[in-house]
Image (cartoon, helix red, strand yellow):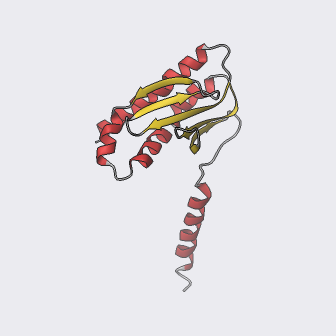
Amino acid sequence: MEAEKEKLYNDITNVFTDVIEKVSTDENCSLTDVYVCVKFDDLSLVVYDDAENVLLQTSIDGWNDLKENSENFEDEVIDSLKYVLNTDDIKQKFEAIDFAAPFSVILVDDDFEQICELATYDKDTIYLEDNFFDKMDKELDEFFEKLMSDVQ
């Protein structure tokens, strides 16, 4: 299973590496965002620039195994995209291109409606995940309960 996941991550990494190379060679391209659309029926990935031009379209074979072995396939796809986009290798490659900060990679549906933000890159600012405060609230509640358990 780990080998399949590693291959999946490599396939997704190659997609974003190809997109970055294509954008970096285009002198007239200055991005503010990149949009990613996953076609769940044919397991393809389409990457668009901020003018909705297709930068790359390919199928991801590793998602087939994930689809067969997953209870919530769409969440697994989103998690795999977020994982790859937050690796140091991809972060460095995105930060090397010319973009208007902050630069986001956004998951969209077929109608270009935003589903979620996959990653945000900005050389000067650190961004927290959407659910950071929910996680922090839960951790603080658990800590307080453990701390106060001796008092009761």
Quarter placement of the N terminus: top left
Q: Residue at x 33, y 42 (%)?
A: 66
The number of numbered badges drawn on the structure is 0
Quarter placement of the C terminus: bottom right
In the depicted structure, whether residue 53 falls above or below residue 102: above
Image location (x, y in percent) of residue 11: 40, 29
Q: Residue at x 53, y 40 (%)?
A: 109
Judge from the rendering whether residue 121 lies leftward or rightward of residue 150; answer left or right: right
* Viewer-proximal residue among 26 and 127: 26
Residue 14 in sight = no
Residue 22 in sight = yes
Q: Residue at x 56, y 32 (%)?
A: 91
Q: Residue at x 45, y 32 (%)?
A: 45
Image location (x, y in percent) of residue 2: 31, 40
Judge from the rendering whether residue 123 lies leftward or rightward of residue 34; answer left or right: right
Image location (x, y in percent) of residue 71: 34, 53
- Residue 145's image quarter? bottom right
Residue extending farthest bottom:
152
